[in-house]
Image: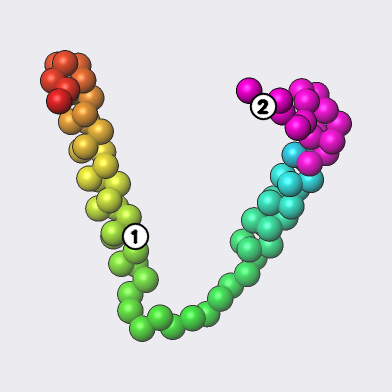
Amino acid sequence: MLSPVLQKNDKKARWLIFSFSAIVFAAVVALGRVQVKVDLGFDVHLFALINAILNSCVAVLLIAALIAVKNKNIC
């Protein structure tokens, strides 16, 4: 088994985690303020429709899997 490079409660690990979190937070805030005006030539709401269809399919499959597991009907 490999030993971890950073030990538990290591100051270097804590510094890396906090600095990475701050950088990601700053990037999210900065990108939230950027407005890009791009004409893609098609309705961008198509992506939301595709996302909704995929989410619905996954929900149905998860419910079917739950029912199969509860009935012990596993291949």
**Prevailing SS of the magenta stretch:** loop
Q: Residues within 10 Å of mark 1 (few under 14, many from 20)?
A: few
Q: Which residues are magenta?
A: 1-16
Q: How is the image coloured?
A: rainbow
Q: Nearer the viewer, mark 1 or mark 2?
A: 2
- Quarter where residue 32 is shown: bottom right
Residue in front for this viewpoint, 4 or 34:
4
Q: Amino acid at mark 2?
A: Leu
- Name the quadrant of the C terminus: top left
Marks 1 and 2, the one that precedes in the sequence: 2
Indicate whether residue 29 is drawn in magenta.
no
C-alpha separation, residue under disc 1 versus residue under disc 2: 44 Å
Where in the figure is residue 18, as x and y percent of width and height? Answer: 78, 40
**Relative to 69, does residue 23 appear above or below in the rendering?**
below
Where in the figure is residue 9, as x and y percent of width and height? Answer: 80, 24
The answer to whether 59 appears left or right of 37 in the picture is left
**Relative to 73, does residue 53 appear above or below in the rendering?**
below
Residue at 86% of width from left, 31% of height from top?
11
Q: Amino acid at mark 1?
A: Ala
Instruction: Report the disc number at residue 2.
Output: 2
- Name the quadrant of the N terminus: top right
The answer to whether 58 appears left or right of 23 in the picture is left
